[in-house]
Amino acid sequence: MNRGRQYGGRVMLLVLYIAGLTTLKAEGQMWQCTEPDGGKRFTNIQADASGCQLMSLRTNIKLPAPSPTLPSPASLPSPPSLKPARETQNLESFPKISAGMQQQRELDRRKILEKELETEQRNLQEAQHLLAEQEATRSGNERNYQRVLDRLAPFQKAVLLHEENVANLRKELTALP
């Protein structure tokens, strides 16, 4: 058992060593090759670089030296003062709508919700009718009851969806003034 662990450790070291060598090789030299059709190809493999031009990858970047002292807090710009939104807004100039306009909006909303409720109730009745038809139908290949349940599942989901929509629309209508 110890021999297997030693062998595994040696293999791991060998893999890490090879990975390190390939990393060093990748950071080495690059060649730029011009293809016969005029396209350019770049490679870091010397064997593939016959007839190619060696590229210089060294760049002379000079970084500024760090400043020896930090600026004083007094020389830093002060942050803008943060005031609550209520204090900065003038509530009298805030746009308001008249009571008549608000009533008209509420009436329009009620009409829209009632129309949606009628549509959802029709959709619910249709979904319930389709579910009843599917429940009454039984084909010969459905000897296993799970197949019947799988066939009915989408129809049951549709009925449930429309029931939830009707309930939510009724709830919204009762919440209106």
Image: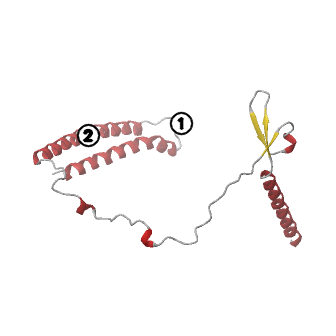
Picture coordinates of residue 25 (x, y %)?
81, 52
Q: Mark 1 points at which residue?
A: 141
Would residue 145 appear left or right of 165 to someone viewing this image? right
Helix, strand or loop under label 2:
helix
Q: Residue at x 75, y 49 (%)?
A: 57
Q: What residue type is labelled 2?
A: Glu
Q: Which of marks 2 and 1 is nearer the N terminus?
A: 2
141, 31: nearer the viewer: 31
**Residue with the most extreme left position:** 100
Reply above or below: 23 against 120: below
Q: Distance between the residues labelled 2 and 1?
A: 40 Å
For image coordinates 36% across by 43% down, the residue present is 159
Q: In this figure, which residue is indicated by the disc labeled 2?
A: 116
From the viewer's perspective, tell me whether residue 121 is left or right of residue 40: left
**Rendered view: 132 above or below 79:** above
The quarter of the displayed image where residue 23 is located:
bottom right
